[in-house]
Image (tube, rainbow, N blue to C red):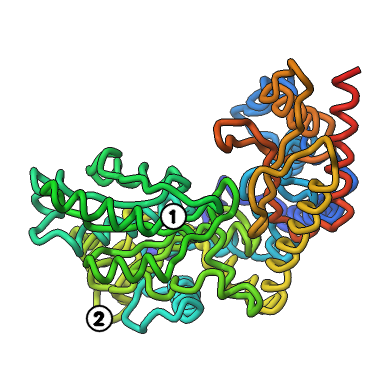
Amino acid sequence: MHPPLHPPALKTRSPLDPDDWEGFREQLRAAADRLVDHVRDQRHWPVWQEMPDAVADRLLDPVTEAGAGAGRAWELLEDTILPYGVGNLHPRFMGWVHGAGTPGGLMAALAEAAINANLGGRNTGAARVERAVIDWTRRLFDFPERSSGILTSGTSMATVIALASARQAQADWDVEAEGLGAEGARFRLYTSEAAHSCVETAMRLLGFGKRAVRRVPTDDRGRMLTDGLHAAIRADRDAGLRPFAVVGTAGTVDIGAVDDLQAIADIADAENLWFHVDGAFGALLRLSPRLRERVDGIERADSIAFDFHKWLHVTYDCGCALIREESAHRAAFHGRPRYLEGQAEGLAAGDPWFCDYGPELSRGFRALRVWFLLVEHGTDALAEAIEGSVERAAHLAERVDAEPLLERVAPAALNIVCFRVLPLEGEDADALNVKVVAELQRRGIAAPSTTRIAGRVVIRCCLMNHRATRADMDVTVDGVLRIVEELRR
């Protein structure tokens, strides 16, 4: 006789579930109300405020053996953590390339936490959602049905995955089993001087070393010089080296320049190189009928890396690696142990698993955030948000050009405007511009960042936020001028 599944004397309540589910439901509703207010009311708060050391030093004080309960934990979160974010929800956050999220993202995040799926593989509805999102991405970039993809933490990890696939495809030996060896040390990759640092990081992680990266000069608009690319490839071949890949950029981080992807694709084809596009944010210009021609040629890439959490405002973090040839992609990462063996039926079915396409076995349900955004808003609204940020950049550039105290230092080709405050005689221009940016941030007026162009520190305004208006551009410029006036008194 078998014992009952739940003997009366057996404790069945989990120590991690609430004692009072209805009470927890009310706490969750109250928290949701507060979070909606937090997103809705961002404009009325400082763009950014620093967490005081006294608050940071006490973050672990409430951790006790007995626990304080969800209600108390939420109160502490609301008081000590919620006010001190990065600031990227605010319409005048202009630093770096951060998406602003959407209110609907709260619903997707809640469902994601409730489902709590591990997307390493297996036959699950969550895996089907990620495959659907990848299929939508494939069609967006006119990739063939044989292509594959995987959602990642961001473009940095997507670049590692893409270049690992390139290494696999270009090596004429079993690089996964034998490593790079002396032959691999001859490999060379080409990208522009303005390319993101994640390219060099990926090359280091993949065993090539940063010296394998050839930086090609750019023109006065920040685009890779294709004549320079061709010359670098020829010189390396003549030196007995082995060119294997070229990386084009769709939207450089400093100024938003887009390389001539068609010309680079032509060179890659002629030289038998893997063509990868770093499209962290610029790749999504494909959504806009008005702007998509700026990334013509991206459909010819062997791989694309981009982020959903930038210009599509999916909740952090969510990037994507898209690979034209699934066979090269899977060959770079496949190899499961016995306990992860796939089956023809049941939960262990569903080959290929996503762990066959990247280094992670434990993966969150990022695809749900993308799916929800696409269903909620549709592609027209997403394209409108992209176009709006480009239009606001044009307005900001015009405003800067009209101010005698300011000098624009780069074309405003997309959504990034770089300018500087002109120094007075004897004034340290770099120090002045650094101070202006710090004061804008400290006062909560706006949050641009700094970069260096032609060796000079400049103010960099990256306009990603879908909540921003032209008036926010004017507030920012007015704030710069007011701070400069105060600093010079």
Q: Are marks 2 and 1 in contact (CB under 8 Å)?
A: no
**Count of numbered tags:** 2
| Vertical position of residue 315 compared to residue 46: above or below | below
From the viewer's side, name the closer residue of 85 and 92. Answer: 92
Query: Measured from the top left, where is residue 306 in percent x and y?
Result: 49, 61
The residue under label 2 is 344
- Is residue 322 rendered to the left or right of residue 446? left
Query: Measured from the top left, where is residue 186 in percent x and y?
Result: 15, 46
For the point 37% across and 70% down, the residue is 301
Q: Distance from label 2 to label 1 (Cα)?
A: 48 Å
The answer to whether any part of residue 338 appears in the image is no
The answer to whether any part of residue 442 appears in the image is yes
Query: Measured from the top left, where is residue 395 in percent x and y?
Result: 80, 57
For the point 13% across and 54% down, the residue is 175
Kindly identify the amino acid type of the residue bearing the numbered disc 1.
Met
For the point 44% across and 55% down, the residue is 224
| Vertical position of residue 315 compared to residue 210: above or below | below
From the viewer's side, name the closer residue of 430 and 185. Answer: 430
* Mark number displayed over residue 224: 1
Quarter of the N terminus within the rendering: bottom left
Nearer to us: label 2 or label 1:
1
For the point 75% across and 35% down, the residue is 76
Tag 1 secondary structure: loop
Tag 2 secondary structure: loop
- Is residue 76 rendered to the left or right of residue 203? right
| Vertical position of residue 143 compared to residue 179: above or below | below
Residue 109: image quadrant is bottom right
Q: Earlier in the sequence, mark 2 or mark 1?
A: 1
Kindly identify the amino acid type of the residue bearing the numbered disc 2.
Ala
- Is residue 405 rendered to the left or right of residue 437? right
Quarter of the C terminus within the rendering: top right
